[in-house]
């Protein structure tokens, strides 16, 4: 029994580290958009570096990846009042893939990521971008 538990634990640890589950900063974000969800919904990137975003929209409508400025967040719903607090954004048409680059913020911390399409934030389409210090 102990050997089986040990073997399963080692497999689990291997899978986590091979999938980036350790949360190490990466200069590439691979993301899938579906109706009202990002997969994954948490990302860790290095501060101040060029980041490549590979986005696939498997949804039926346009989805957006909007990074809010540090220390800001959307209120009850994403709207015109939030436009001044956007750090960076991109939209992807339904059934399309898009690869773009942006420069990561230089300030470390957690940034809110939201879909700016009307009603999507309220429906739960948001995530977290963690900006980590360079090592």
Image (cartoon, rainbow, N blue to C red):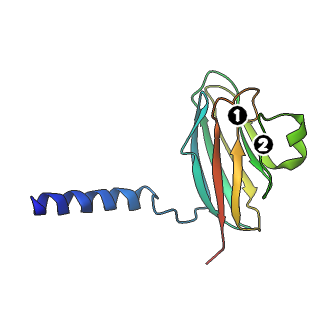
Q: Which mark is residue 82?
A: none
Residue 21 appears at what percent x and percent y?
A: 45, 58
Q: Residue at x 63, y 34 (%)?
A: 124
Q: Residue at x 58, y 65 (%)?
A: 25
Residue 31 appears at what percent x and percent y?
A: 58, 43
Q: Tag 2's secondary structure? A: loop
How many tags in the picture? Answer: 2
Q: Residue furthest left?
A: 1
Q: Residue furthest bottom?
A: 135
Q: Quadrant of the N terminus?
A: bottom left
Category of crowding for the residue at label 1, using alpha-carbon neighbours closer than 10 angstroms: few (below 14), some (14–19), many (at least 20): many
Q: Which residue is mark 1?
A: 121
Q: Tag 1's secondary structure? A: loop
Task: State the residue in front, 103 or 38.
Answer: 38
Mark toward the start of the polypeptide (1 vs 2): 2
Q: Residue at x 71, y 50 (%)?
A: 112
Q: Residue at x 65, y 25 (%)?
A: 94
* 66 left or right of 53 in image: right
Q: Are marks 1 and 2 in contact (CB under 8 Å)?
A: yes
Q: Quadrant of the C terminus?
A: bottom right
Q: CA distance from mark 1 to mark 2?
A: 9 Å
Q: Which mark is residue 74?
A: 2
Residue 22 appears at what percent x and percent y?
A: 46, 63
* 122 left or right of 7 in image: right
Residue 11 appears at what percent x and percent y?
A: 26, 58
């Amino acid at each position: 029994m102990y050997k089986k538990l040990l073997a399963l634990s080692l497999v689990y640890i291997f899978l986590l580290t091979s999938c980036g589950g350790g949360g190490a900063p990466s200069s590439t974000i691979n993301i899938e958009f579906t109706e009202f969800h990002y997969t994954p919904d948490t990302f860790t990137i290095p501060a101040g570096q060029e980041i490549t975003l590979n986005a696939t929209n498997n949804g039926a409508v346009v989805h957006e990846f909007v990074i809010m400025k540090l220390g800001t967040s959307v209120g009850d719903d994403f709207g015109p009042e939030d436009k001044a607090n956007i750090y960076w954004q991109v939209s992807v048409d339904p059934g399309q893939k898009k690869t773009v680059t942006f420069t990561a913020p230089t300030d470390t911390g957690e940034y809110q990521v939201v879909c700016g399409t009307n009603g999507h934030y309220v429906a739960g389409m948001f995530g977290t971008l963690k900006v980590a210090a360079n090592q």
